Image (cartoon, rainbow, N blue to C red):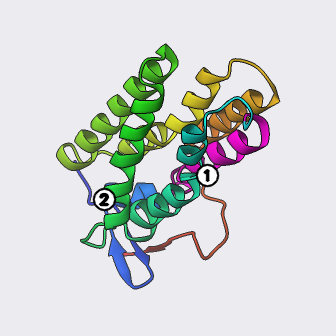
């Protein structure tokens, strides 16, 4: 017997179904920041090893993180998309392909992440299943998996891998412990 999923009220907007699962996940919210983490790690640890174009590309991370958060969290389920995320995500990805496309680390990271993104879209929009959230978190792990693949060793790679493990742990434990302003409240039918 199927029951309707609980509705969540997020700033006067009702969000239900698979979107409720996303807004109830700390990992989903935090995964938007992986682009900014790529920037910080690149500037602090690998600035001398990267080309100027690669550093400029890395510096777009905070903007991509903001756009991703706005599109994937703040406006989720409200009936419209955040156009900067829709434009910036493919442009930054294509630029990364130009910079790193010949490297096996990029092909592995991008192949895995793009597969997760496609499967997340399918599981969310076609199947209406909550597991799309984990797949979307894995899609957002692209900057960290790419970083760990490009730079094989060092404390920065350890940080990137640790953050990946933390995101997966948060998702797998269904953590929703962030401040009350970010935590959606259940509305009883």
Left or right, 22 with respect to 119, comes to: right
Left or right, 25 with respect to 189, comes to: right
Q: Main secondary structure of the magenta part?
A: helix
- Check the picture and name the quadrant holding the C terminus: bottom left
- Which residue in the structure is indicated by mark 2? 17
- Regarding residue 118, the answer to whether it shows in the image is yes
Q: For marks 1 and 2, give the one nearer the viewer.
A: 1
Q: Residue at left 30%, top 73%? A: 78
Q: Sequence order check: which comes first, mark 1 or mark 2?
A: 2
- Closer to the camera, 7 or 105? 105
- Which residue in the structure is indicated by mark 1? 36
Residue 184: percent from the left, percent from the top? 51, 71
Q: Residue at left 47%, top 36%? A: 138
Residue 147: percent from the left, percent from the top? 61, 30
Residue 84: percent from the left, percent from the top? 36, 64
- Numbered range of the magenta stretch: 24-46
In the rendered image, which quarter is residue 45 located in?
A: top right
In the rendered image, which quarter is residue 55 located in?
A: top right
How far apart in space, not on screen, are marks 1 and 2 (Cα)? Answer: 29 Å
Q: Is residue 29 above or below residue 94?
A: below
Label 1 sits on a secondary structure element that is helix
- Closer to the camera, 38 or 3? 38
């Amino acid at each position: 017997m199927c029951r309707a999923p609980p509705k969540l009220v997020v700033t006067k907007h009702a969000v239900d179904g698979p979107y409720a699962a996303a807004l109830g996940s700390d990992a989903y919210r935090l995964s938007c920041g992986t682009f900014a983490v790529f920037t910080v790690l690149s500037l602090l640890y690998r600035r001398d090893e990267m080309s100027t174009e690669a550093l400029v590309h890395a510096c777009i991370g905070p903007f991509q993180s903001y756009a991703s958060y706005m599109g994937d969290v703040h406006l989720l389920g409200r009936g419209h998309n955040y156009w900067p995320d829709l434009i910036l995500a493919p442009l930054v990805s294509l630029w990364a392909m130009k910079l790193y496309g010949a490297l096996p680390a990029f092909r592995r990271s991008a192949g895995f992440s793009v597969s997760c993104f496609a499967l997340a879209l399918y599981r969310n929009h076609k199947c209406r299943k909550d597991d799309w959230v984990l797949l979307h978190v894995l899609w957002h792990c692209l900057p960290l998996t790419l970083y760990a693949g490009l730079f094989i060793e060092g404390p920065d790679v350890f940080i990137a891998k640790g953050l990946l493990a933390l995101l997966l742990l948060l998702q797998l434990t269904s953590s929703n412990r962030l401040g009350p302003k970010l935590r959606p409240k259940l509305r009883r039918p």
